[in-house]
Image (tube, rainbow, N blue to C red):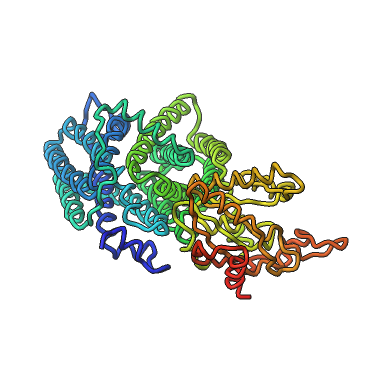
Amino acid sequence: MTPTTEAASLPEGHANQFTLLGQRRFAPFFWTQFAGAANDNLFKFAFTVMVTYQLQLAWMPPAMAGLAIGALFILPFLLFSATAGQLTDKHDKTKMIRFVKNLEIAIMAIAAWGFLRADAVVLLGCVFLMGLHSTLFGPVKFAYLPQVLAPRELTGGNGMVEMGTFVAILLGQVAGGLLVALPQVGHATVAVACLLLALAGRAVAQAIPPAPATDPGLAINWNPVSETWRNLKLAHGNRVVFRSLLGISWMWFFGAVFLAQFPSFAKEVLHGDEQVASLLLVVFSVGIGVGSLLCETLSRRQVEIGLVPLGAIGMSVFAIDLYFASRGLPAAAQMGLDAFTAQPAHWRVMADLGLLSLFAGLYSVPMYALIQMRSQPTHRARIIAANNILNALFMIASSVIAGALLKAGFTIPQIFLFTGIANAVVAFYIFMLVPEYLLRFVAWVLSRFVYRFDIRGQEHIPEEGAAVLVCNHVSFIDAVLLMAASPRPIRFIMDHRIFRVPLLGWLFRLAKAIPIAPQKEDPAAYEQAFADAVQVLREGDLLAIFPEGAITRDGSLQPFKGGVMKILEAARAEGLEPPVVPMALTNLWGSYFSRIEQRDGQQVAMVRPFRRGLFSRVGLRVGSAMPRAEVQPESLQRRVSVLLGT
């Protein structure tokens, strides 16, 4: 059984993100990347501590050590990411992983020699080489997951990897700082630890199952400049993917501001010692890990990009509150961990930092999963490589801008404030450019906080390719609930009058819903709606139609009209045979958005808010696609009626 087949054969609801750790297609990969991230950070942090506190180097003063090491580590991402993406698409990803881990062993052997000799030049060279190691591993890391995980496992898998990465970073830095400080044996201990971690990672990598090349015929372009430009153009070809890459890169910009300032923030603002700085790193890492793990629970195990606006809101709110929590702290002598945690004001600072990073996890994991799902498999790794290039550029920009602000006399809390405000502006801009994020957020909120939305048969919604979704029409938010149920965008054919409803009309315009008017009322709009519907199918997207033609006024299923047949016939004329999937919304009649109220002899909706209270139970039942020969308005109506249980 191949990994992909294994993923596809899992029973619905069988695996969650934690049970993946018991499966060969995921567990060896997880521990391989965990060991690599831990080793990166153990090595870098031990080296930083060594040149800051133990060596006296005239050519690299302590204040410059962190910057020099960080810059050398990031440089390979700019130089070699494009090549790494090509290699990953061309070759078996498992073989690439093992090659990278072999390279890590060689680098750590040189680094061990450098630690034993306390040779900073050798260790700086190893920093660059470990940056190269991470550059090669980056595209493999994110291109491997969609190849071995089912679409409904992507969010959980990415959450586990994101959590594991930050825990590994934390443990690596803590271990590096402790080991290098051991009297007499510190350097030797770090050397042995780095080698052992590299060997452990390579041993675990041997158990990763094959992940065949997605574009074995690819001709490698070894020119990093032209290939970098080509990768960026390749990513730009898919608007949603490219703007998601920008969104992730912004998250790295945002995070780099905070991570880079932790030591100074702890010392100058919080008046704490090195242990306090380490505590801030622990709180930040735990927050990222918790947020990453929450994504699967909050997303119903689908790629739920509606969490991205939620994450952006939380990042801004708590970054701004961190400014207010830290700006008025009184001057004090340098505190240790016990004295720091004994003051209630410091708990607000830690809460802000933990929640800020938690929401950053909610923000980033769905974006990574979306990029993996929407990128073409043949050049997915090159898209990830483009993301790594953008990430590096944004992190460099973060350092330059933060440095300029500090030089201009701004305080660290003020920089946090500016970053929180900038995050709100950037997020709003991205969500206006890509309305799908905002639409999914609205759908997620409605299906979580207004209703208890129970979905059954979700696996019948096609994961790729064109399809026609046919559903009963009960309320003004039927389309929003269908959005919440589908991991893919849906284009809706909707009565033109619904676009006049305040707020809902704006929402459906954002969703690019197709307005349709009666043929007698507006023949041109009627024909244009069908032409647009066929175009949706031609582009391989999901099209939803409510064949009753109007929202029910008595709660019963109305006769289906023939519009769906006209769409299918027009599609067939172009050689398209999209599957037709029946769906039924249940228990929505009687809710605020249904036409249950009487006013001036008319059945109207949206009169009594919360008429059934909060969290009233509604549902969606999705049936299997109907055989093409059986698709008629009457048979479709019967299938939907069966799904309704009537």
The residue located at (49%, 26%) in the rendering is 409
Percent of width and height locating residue 204: 20, 56
Residue 468, quarter of the rendered image: bottom right
Residue 639, quarter of the rendered image: bottom right
The residue located at (35%, 50%) in the rendering is 166
Above or below, 53 against 156 in this view is above
Q: Between residues 630 and 198, which one lies in front from this camera angle?
A: 630
Q: Is residue 139 visible?
A: yes
Q: Between residues 453 and 323, which one lies in front from this camera angle?
A: 453
Residue 206, quarter of the rendered image: bottom left
Percent of width and height locating residue 248: 44, 41
Percent of width and height locating residue 458: 49, 63
Quadrant housing the N terminus: bottom left
Q: Is residue 368 left or right of residue 586?
A: left
Q: Between residues 107 and 329, which one lies in front from this camera angle?
A: 107
Above or below, 560 against 303 in this view is below
The residue located at (74%, 49%) in the rendering is 497
Give the total of numbered labels: 0
Quadrant housing the C terminus: bottom right
Above or below, 241 against 498 in this view is above
Q: Is residue 417 visible?
A: no
